[in-house]
Amino acid sequence: MFVNKGINLIDICEEKNISISEYTIMCEEEESGCARSVIIEKMRKNLNIMREAAEYGLTNETKSMGGLIGGDAIKLNRYMATGNSLTGDFMIKAMARAVSCSEVNAAMGKIVAAPTAGSCGIIPAVIITVGEKLNKTEDELINALFTASGVGILIAKNATLSGAEGGCQAECGSAAAMGAAAVVEMMGGTPAMALDAAAIVIKNILGLVCDPVAGLVEVPCSKRNIAGAVSALTTADLTMSGVKSRIPFDDTVIAMYKVGMQLPCELRETAMGGLATTPTGLKMAENIMLKQGKIK
């Protein structure tokens, strides 16, 4: 059975001299009764779907069902080719992959909802892009996904992954925390460092509301996937430099849950507040309803 607290996870990993990914696999073997090879192959399938979603938008003009987003991934990919970016090819490629997944999702394509459909671009973007930079094998990328899964389990056990329950901090925030922890492990960091990275991400995104325009997972969701990917990557570097989180991971998760519960319902995926009720947001929603024949 997977532990309930990050501090317990760190203790077990240090005692057994194993990584978070290894512990997660061991728990899955115990709980599912499946052989290790079967579990690995299931995660390989997830990785392959993530790759497809992360790459599709880089060369294809993807249009969402609501018509609010599409084509941003290919713009970023073309911009990268100019060599004029401030943050460099690595960061631009991660950003493009994050929004590509969001566009595929909004176009009813196949994605891996890790941890949710609305935040589906963050983990693929960071793990795949870091994997390229560090020349990681496919098996190492799979291990990174197990690390992300382990952190996600802890968040789910102690808080929530649902925007409807905890705001976007619970979706894109959790995804970015999971991604940051995975990247730290990919870079050779310890379990304690991985959870420090996850804690810092949560602290920096605490209170983020869920306010989808027209109730669709399009605006501002796709841009928040980009922001989450960037946060995960920069926080991983921060942690690998030796910077620690003054507030431990377990406390940040509890704080996130409490903040989410304090958010009014208008700011929890109802499209009744935030950006969804700005003049432009309301106009977008009206135009969609007109196209669908719901109003005349």
Image (tube, rainbow, N blue to C red):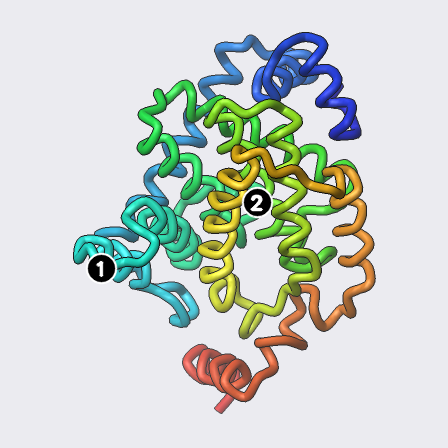
- Who is closer to the viewer here, 67 or 89? 89
Q: Secondary structure at mark 2?
A: helix
Residue 249, given in percent of the width and then of the height, sits at 72, 38
Mark 1 highlights which residue?
A: 84
For mark 2, does the 10 Å Cα neighbourhood hold few (<14), some (14 to 19), or many (20 or more) residues?
A: many
- Who is closer to the viewer here, 222 or 80? 80
Q: Name which of mark 1 and mark 2 comes first in the sequence.
A: 1
Q: Which mark is residue 175?
A: 2
Whether residue 60 is visible here, answered yes or no, is: no
Relative height, residue 291 to residue 40 (above, below): below
Marks 1/2 in contact by CB < 8 Å: the verdict is no
- Relative to 204, is 247 on the left or the right? right
User: Among all residues in the image, which is located at the extreme bottom?
Assistant: 296
Identify the residue at image location x=46%, y=60%.
Answer: 222
Relative height, residue 22 to residue 89 (above, below): above
Callout 1 amino acid? Asn
Q: Secondary structure at mark 1?
A: loop
Relative height, residue 236 to residue 4 (above, below): below
- Relative to 190, is 133 on the left or the right? left
Relative height, residue 164 to residue 145 (above, below): below
Identify the residue at image location x=82%, y=63%.
Answer: 262
Residue 200, given in percent of the width and then of the height, sits at 64, 45
User: Among all residues in the image, which is located at the extreme left?
Assistant: 82
Q: Quadrant of residue 62?
A: bottom left
Whether residue 239 is visible here, answered yes or no, is: yes
- Who is closer to the viewer here, 191 or 175? 191
For mark 1, does the 10 Å Cα neighbourhood hold few (<14), some (14 to 19), or many (20 or more) residues?
A: few
Q: Quadrant of residue 20?
A: top right
Foreground mark, 1 or 2? 1
Residue 45, given in percent of the width and then of the height, sits at 42, 27
- Who is closer to the viewer here, 224 or 18? 18
